[in-house]
Image: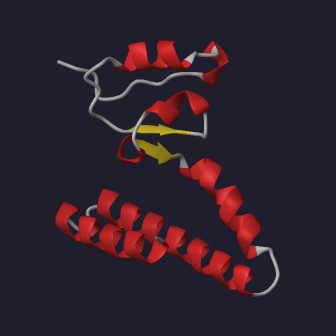
Amino acid sequence: MMPMLTVFSQALRLSSAAAMELLGPCFGGIVVSDRFSVYNQLSLEQRQLCWTHIDPDITAIAERPGARAEMGKRLLNLRHQLFEHWHRGKGGEINRKQLRQQFRTIRAEFE
């Protein structure tokens, strides 16, 4: 059985070649990470930025003046909705199909 999750520490100072070797030539999953450049070799469909690293960017946009602040506030609201639905799904209030639908709606607005 293949592992469901593997965690790499940036402290390892992986080279791109080493990271790709660890993932393997047939890697078909998704890497959730910071902006560590080692993962630039993966397609965008195989990369997801960790929300811990996205939040400061969105907050900075919300703190700018004018229209950018409004956009940033909207993005923060969408992030709040996303996690609210995630917690509802985890708590059994909504099923996986409903959760997926909510995520699709939020993702479309976010994009």
| Residue 69 x/y as whole percent | 73, 80
Give the residue drawn at x 18%, y 66%. Answer: 97
Quarter of the N terminus within the rendering: top left
Task: Name the outermost residue toward the right.
Answer: 65
In the picture, residue 5 is in which quadrant?
Answer: top left
Left or right: 60 in relation to 104: right
Look at the image and name its color scheme: secondary structure
In the figure, residue 57 lies in which quadrant?
bottom right
Choose top left, top right, bottom left or bottom right for residue 2.
Answer: top left
Is 44 drawn above or below residue 10 in the view shown? below
Marks counted in the figure total: 0
Is residue 106 shown left or right of residue 37?
A: left
Going by the image, does 89 lie left or right of 84? left
Q: Where is residue 109 in the image (x, y as percent from the top left)?
A: 44, 77
| Residue sitting at x 46%, y 46% | 48
Rendered residue at 27%/66% (across/down): 99
Give the camera-side residue of 48 and 51: 48
16 up-or-down from 71: above or below: above
Please tell me whether residue 11 is drawn above or below residue 54 in the rendered image.
above
Q: Residue at x 72, y 70 (%)?
A: 61
Q: Is residue 77 above or below residue 39?
A: below
Q: Position of residue 3 (x, y in %)?
A: 28, 22
Instruction: List x then y, in percent, for residue 94.
Output: 25, 69
Residue 73 versus residue 21: which sits nearer the camera?
21
| 95 left or right of 81 in image | left
